Image: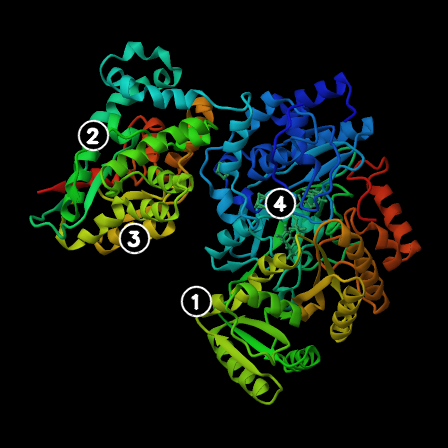
Amino acid sequence: MKKKLNKGQEKFLLSLFGPQDVLFQREELLIYGTDASKEFAWPYAVVRPSKVEQIVELLKWADREGVPIIPRARATNVVGACVPVHGGIIVSTLKLNRILDIDEVDFVAEVEPGVVTAHLQQEVRKKGLFYPPDPASVNISTIGGNISQNAGGLSAVKYGVTKDYVLGMDVVLAGGRILSLGGRIRKDVVGLDLKSLMVGSEGTLGFFTHFTLKLLPLPESSVSILVGFPSLDELVFNAIALLKKGLIPSAMEFMDSGVIKCIKEIYPLDVSSKVDSLLLLKFDGNKRDIKYCVNELDKIFNDSSAIFWEKGVDPEKENELWEVRRMINPASHRLGDNKIALDICVPRSKIPYIVRVSKQIGEKYSVIVLCFGHLGDGNIHVNIMYSGGENQIGAIEVKKEILRHTIQVGGTISGEHGVGILKMDFMETQVGVHAKKIMKKIKKIFDPNNIMNPGKAY
Amino acid sequence: MHRFDFSITTCLLCGKCLDVCPVFNGTYIEEFSPRAKAFLLNKLNEIPLDLVKVKDILGKCVGCGRCGSVCPQNIDLVSMLSQIRASNPTLKKWAYSKAVEHLPGISRLLLHSLDTLDIIPFFKKYEGVWRIFSDQKQLNILKVQIRKPIEKREKAVIFSGCIGRYLKDSWSIKAHKIARLYFEVCEDMDWACCGYPFFFAGQLDKAKGNFEKNYNLWKKLHMPKIIVFCATCYFALKKQSRLIPDESKRKRWLDSIILLSDLFVGLKEYIHIDLHIKEFVLHKPCHMSDLSFDRLRSFFNTLNIKFSLNTNCCGFGGCTRVENPELCDMLGKSIWDKVGRDSVIVSGCSGCVLQFALTNPMSRSYHWLDLIDFI
Ligand SMILES: Cc1cc2nc3c(=O)[nH]c(=O)nc-3n(C[C@H](O)[C@H](O)[C@H](O)COP(=O)(O)OP(=O)(O)OC[C@H]3O[C@@H](n4cnc5c(N)ncnc54)[C@H](O)[C@@H]3O)c2cc1C
Ligand code: SF4
Ligand code: SF4
């Protein structure tokens, strides 16, 4: 590692943050060079602000000195968004973790960026309120990270993703100016929507210090249903019929034949060999709605090609049904030590096609490809399993071909995880040269000296 | 550069362990997180690092094992730390195990002549606490009235652990009374420490030596049941079964170790309550299984005693307690801050009980054995 800060710069950081909250030694810096992508690059230093004023001063100074700034929350992003590819100073948000207010009249929460999303959910639930975005990493990732990656989860089909819950935010820009965008208001058509531009910006436009989030009333009750179909085409056909009837689930997950097979290896999933694909649904709402919903579902599945369906009306049974979904990750590791996990998103009608093509591509390179995910949004988790170095090359080829097909059918290379550094190669193919250029120009307006998380996303 | 013959290569860097780690959650310092330690261990052979600084980071761990319990890759960081410490003298931890070794002699000094405590600064630092801890009045709210043994077929022996043996003999006395209802209880043996402090400190030879002594004593007594009232001793004695090569003996050893609370909860019908405390906080020791803890919890539930739960780690920390007392003090105090300084905390692990006493001068920290009284 070449040392990139001079003595004066080190002194500045020490005076701003105090010796406890500045790191220069490589033993301490090590973890800050990586994230859940497993990519690595050395940062110059790490700082841990606990006050907004420190961030303002830091961004003034860094802009002047041309030192890259990399915001870092819990580093659970899987695309290398926190990896300091151009060196720079990692700014940890872990000490900015207060829930400042939960308002039961305005239905909003005001939070700092380092709050863990599940902690916020627990606190609002105590007041009968609900913060719906639920990435699988809800217990381990933060609101700041979720907003920066525009994270989504199971409930997106009914409730949308993180961006749908951001009403306002404060952003410190390179150079130290603070931009206050939006607020407790639910409608606002004045000027360009800069707040939405910030969501999903992967730390490249500014440093977020405060959010106002929209809350909903907590649903009273829920029901879950696991349905087995003889083919994926049948599954998608019936799922769409259900949506057309106005039955909007709060989760709509599918699992393909490969997934079912590997779950069966580690979990007593008792389904007949005729079942090719599984659909897992959850509905929430008030008790009357749920009752109606259960009746309608019985009718729909009775008239369909469904091989079986199993309901969970109490939390225990619901949990049992969802255990099947939770088994995918541990079960998949039986098929390879490593995996490339894609989170492509395609129009719903294209799901059977893209799943079929992905498997064919896998077969061509002799790697196993598993497909499952959020059917309601067309967001498919494609896991390309491999072991050791030899079929890693094959797996990378599989990834490229699948992404190419995804773009061809009008899909996106990422529905949830973002671009970071790992998907940069495909970014331009999807959005086009012009769109990418415009994004870069927009960044220049907010960050003329390119200090905010350089080399990421676009 | 020292070459280590193992590293952690399976960590996914997923960050699931951050949420459960008491050290991380008490400090919000990411380099102290289990993920950071796993990554450091992974890179030791690849990147030249200063082992003294590495030791300092790895030392910010209280050995609770919580990270392993949520890790999708089953990474047992505590065992990894133990191995890595064992493999390199710079990384080894000495102070706590020295403290444990000296405990038999020092316990007398602790309780009687405090000015000689300077030998080990740890004892000196908490000099006011030892006697209070040792002489503390018992709560005696559960009156056990039982004359006839419940069953008395097998032989058993009590394993009191270092704290029970040297600082709190009242626990051992009660443990005997309970055990005698179920078993033919032998005389106390001259057990060695359960080995956990040595294991965590990377002093595997000593841990093994202790185990062999204990194992031989057990065999000499014709393999009786071993009744343990400290959850960490119980955990350690079970874990060391790995050192028994013969499979049938290993099984016998595992079967013979019994956690006293698992027995005690069976006495429900012989207990009446003399409640002179309003309520207490039942603490879940990290090394007590969910099953044993649930038994204890439902026992108190059926007795209709009011209590709340604390499931956060006490932060005792084994060798870390001695080498990083500030960290462990901070973790213990944060629990008192949460539950209230004048609360009563009850645990089933001697280490937790000591930790709560060390971090609150009002010393309202009790083993569940302190709650009971035989009439
Ligand atoms: C097991 C697992 C499951 C996952 N499941 C899902 C899922 O279901 N859906 C999904 O969408 N994602 C998922 N992810 C990915 C990841 O959890 C999300 O991307 C999450 O939003 C990242 O949050 P974080 O707090 O870890 O942020 P980090 O990874 O620390 O940071 C992410 C980005 O945000 C930026 N950033 C962080 N804080 C700020 C700030 N205050 N100001 C400006 N920029 C900031 C960083 O620079 C970086 O670019 C999963 C990851 C794992 C490991
Ligand atoms: S053993 Fe406990 S203290 Fe140590 S790293 Fe794991 S969770 Fe943290
Ligand atoms: S939970 Fe396990 S795999 Fe995930 S970061 Fe922690 S040690 Fe690594």
- Is residue A223 shown left or right of residue B161? right
Indicate which disc, 4 or 3, sits on the residue closer to the N terminus: 4
Q: Which amino acid does label 3 sit on?
A: Arg
Q: Residue B295 carries which label?
A: 3
Q: Both on one chain, marks 2 and 4? A: yes
> To which chain does the residue with label 4 belong?
B
User: Mark 2 or mark 3, which is nearer to you?
Assistant: 2
Which colour style is shown? rainbow
Q: Mark 1 is on which residue type?
A: Glu
**Label of residue B10 in the image:** 4
Dot 1 alpha-carbon crowd within 10 angstroms: few under 14, some 14 to 19, many 20 or more: few
Please report contact status of discs 1 and 4: CB closer than 8 Å, yes or no: no
Q: Is mark 2 on a helix, strand or loop?
A: helix
- Name the mark nearer the viewer: 2 or 1: 2
Q: Please identify, in this view, whether the residue under mark 2 or under mark 4 is nearer the observer.
A: 4
Residue on which disc 1 sits: A316
Mark yes or no: residue A126 visible: yes
Rendered residue at 14%/47% (across/down):
B181
The secondary element bearing badge 3 is classed as: helix
The reply to whether the residue tagged 4 has its Cβ within 8 angstroms of ligand 3 is yes
Kind of residue at disc 2: Asp
Label 2 is found on which chain of the structure? B
